[in-house]
Image (cartoon, helix red, strand yellow):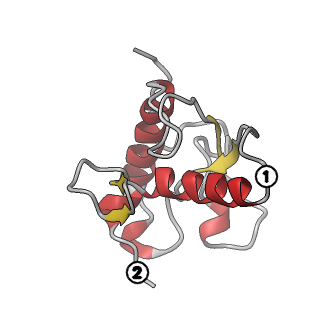
Amino acid sequence: MSINLDYALSRPTAPVVQDGPLTYNNLFDASVDAVYSAMDKVGGSTVRIVISESGWPSGGQGDKTTPALAQEYNNGLIQHVVHGNGTPKRPGIITSTYLFALFNENKKTPGLDQNFGLFYPDMNPVYPISFSFP
């Protein structure tokens, strides 16, 4: 399966996925709404969802895992969530979301898993990130 990079990075593009009346232009909203749909089917429509981990690796697998792409994903995710627009299925519902991870983990197996942090183990930033909210 191949997912369009613009769709995964929440870059402004034409809608990529149409699900009945719902239109998605980013993978984050589509993923969150897939969980909401599953919860609706089992009677959990009032349960609020919390995203416990979301991030983008800054290395470990070629040109799709760079500090620039990780910075773009994480900064875009922060802005998307704090604007409070919700998702197409739950407009206006803020989704509490946590970034994965604070530090790169140099003791993990080399590759993707080592490279999700905002900081290197020596506490230097991997890339600049903004937590300033509008």
Circle number at residue 15? none
Disc 2 to disc 1, C-alpha distance: 32 Å
- Residue 57: image location, x then y, percent: 53, 59
Q: Quadrant of the N terminus?
A: bottom left
Instruction: Report the residue at 67% width, 40% height from top.
Output: 102
Which residue of the protein is positioned furthest toward the left in this rendering?
Answer: 14
Viewer-closest of 125 and 132: 132
- Residue 72: image location, x then y, percent: 38, 45
Look at mark 2 in the image and give the residue it sits on. 2
On the image, which quarter does residue 127 sit in?
A: top left
Q: Is residue 43 visible?
A: yes
Position of residue 46 in the picture relative to residue 130 (left or right): right
Instruction: Report the residue at 22% width, 54% height from top.
Output: 13
Position of residue 12 in the picture relative to residue 73 (left or right): left
Instruction: Report the residue at 40% width, 73% height from top.
Output: 3
Does the CB distance between marks 2 and 1 fall below 8 Å?
no
Q: Is residue 97 above or below residue 27?
A: above
Please tell me whether mark 2 sits on a helix, a strand or a loop: loop
Q: Is residue 121 visible?
A: no
Viewer-closest of 42 and 82: 42
Look at mark 1 in the image and give the residue it sits on. 43
Which residue of the protein is positioned furthest toward the bottom in this rendering?
Answer: 1
- Residue 29: image location, x then y, percent: 48, 50
